[in-house]
Image: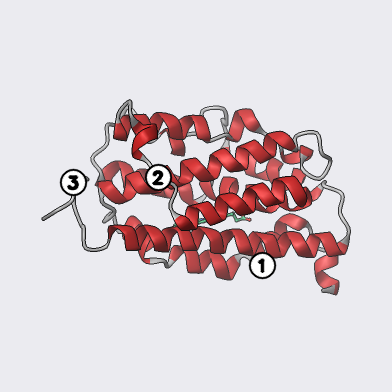
C-alpha cells in the first residue's frame, strides 16, 4: 500500500495487471491465436465482440471528455476503434453485417460494466481505456501480423483496420505520452486503488469474452468460416 502511493499510476497498473495479463495470454483463444490457429469464424466473432465493447467504451469516453478524471487521456482521433471495426465487419460479413452479428452474454456483461463506469463511476474509466488501448498498441501489433498471415488476408490491410493506428506515427512515443497523461490525472490513494482493481476487472471481463468465444466455436472448427457438418 505505502509503496503504491508513491508509484506512478502507469507503473502500478502494469504491475497490478501482470498476473491477469498472463491469464489473458494463456486463454485457449489467445493461445491458438498466437499459434496462427484462429479460424475465420473465430476471428469474425472476435471482431464483432470488440465492436460492441469499443462502441460502449467510446460512448463513455465521449460522455466524459471534459471530466478531469478522464480528460487527460481523451485521444479520440488517435485511438478510437469503433469506426475501424465497422469497416472490418463490413469486409468480413458484407453490407448486412449489422444484422448478422450478435452481442453474446460475456460481451454484454463487459458492455454493461463500461456503461456503469462511464455513467456512475467515471473515475474508473481510465482503467478500461488503459486495458484496451495500451493492449492494442502493444500485443495487438503482434496479433495483427499473425492474423494477416494465418487468415490469408490481403497485404493492403483490408479486414485489419482494427489493428492499424494511422493517426499515431510513433507507437512507442505515444504510449509514453499516454502513460504521462494517466499519471497526471489527479486522484487520492483510495481512488488509485479502485482504478487498479477496475483494471484487473476489465482484464477478467476480456478473459470471459475469450472463453465464451471459444465455447461458441467449439465443435465447429473451420478454415473458411462455414460450419462444418
Ligand atoms: Fe498485452 N502485451 N498481450 N494484452 N498488454 C503487452 C502489453 C500490454 C500480448 C503481448 C503484450 C493482451 O494480450 C496479449 C495489455 C493488454 C492485453 C506485450 C506487451 C500478447 C502476445 C497477447 C495475447 C496473446 C490482452 C488480451 C490484453 C487486454 C485485454 C496492456 C494493457 C499492455 C500495456 C502494459 C503496460 O502498462 O505497459 C509484448
Relative placement, left or right, of 105 versus 14 is: left
Mark 3 vs 2: CB contact within 8 A: no
Q: Which mark is residue 16?
A: 1
Pick the residue in front: 193 or 14.
193
* Residue extending farthest front: 99
The answer to whether one can see residue 185 in this image is: yes
Q: Quadrant of residue 177?
A: top right
Residue located 67% across and 40% down the image:
60
* Residue extending farthest left: 229
Chain-order first, disc 3 or disc 2: 2
Query: Can you tell which of label 1 and label 3 is closer to the viewer?
Result: 3
Whole-percent x and y of residue 136? 52, 46
Whole-percent x and y of residue 53? 53, 45
Residue located 50% across and 43% down the image:
52
Residue located 41% across and 43% down the image:
48
- How busy is the neighbourhood of tag 2: few (under 14 within 10 Å), some, or many (20 plus)? some
The Cα atoms of the two marked residues, 3 and 2, are separated by: 17 Å
- How busy is the neighbourhood of tag 1: few (under 14 within 10 Å), some, or many (20 plus)? some
> The C terminus lies in which quarter of the figure?
bottom left
Please give the residue where the numbered disc 3 appears in the rendered image.
226
Please give the residue where the numbered disc 2 appears in the rendered image.
102
Chain-order first, disc 2 or disc 1: 1
Query: Can you tell which of label 2 and label 1 is closer to the viewer?
Result: 2
Relative placement, left or right, of 56 versus 37 is: right
* Residue extending farthest bottom: 1
Amino acid at each position: 500500500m505505502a509503496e503504491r502511493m508513491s508509484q506512478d499510476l502507469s507503473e502500478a497498473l502494469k504491475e497490478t495487471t501482470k498476473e491477469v495479463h498472463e491469464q489473458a495470454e494463456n486463454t485457449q483463444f489467445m493461445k491458438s491465436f498466437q499459434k496462427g490457429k484462429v479460424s475465420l469464424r473465430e476471428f469474425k466473432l472476435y471482431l464483432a465482440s470488440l465492436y460492441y465493447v469499443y462502441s460502449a467504451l467510446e460512448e463513455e469516453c465521449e460522455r466524459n471528455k471534459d471530466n478531469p478524471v478522464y480528460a487527460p487521456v481523451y485521444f479520440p482521433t488517435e485511438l478510437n476503434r469503433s469506426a475501424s471495426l465497422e469497416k472490418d465487419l463490413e469486409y468480413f460479413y458484407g453490407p448486412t453485417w449489422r444484422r448478422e452479428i450478435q452481442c453474446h452474454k460475456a460481451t454484454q456483461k463487459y458492455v454493461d460494466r463500461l456503461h456503469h463506469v462511464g455513467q456512475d463511476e467515471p473515475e474508473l474509466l481510465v482503467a478500461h481505456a488503459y486495458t484496451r488501448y495500451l493492449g492494442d498498441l502493444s500485443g495487438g501489433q503482434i496479433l495483427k501480423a499473425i492474423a494477416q498471415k494465418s487468415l490469408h488476408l490481403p497485404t493492403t490491410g483490408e479486414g485489419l483496420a482494427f489493428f492499424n493506428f494511422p493517426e499515431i506515427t510513433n507507437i512507442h512515443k505515444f504510449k509514453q505520452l499516454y502513460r504521462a497523461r494517466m499519471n497526471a490525472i489527479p486522484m487520492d490513494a483510495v481512488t488509485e486503488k479502485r482504478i487498479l482493481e477496475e483494471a484487473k476487472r476489465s482484464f477478467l471481463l476480456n478473459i470471459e469474452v475469450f472463453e465464451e468465444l471459444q465455447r461458441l466455436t467449439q465443435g465447429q472448427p473451420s478454415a473458411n468460416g462455414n460450419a462444418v457438418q
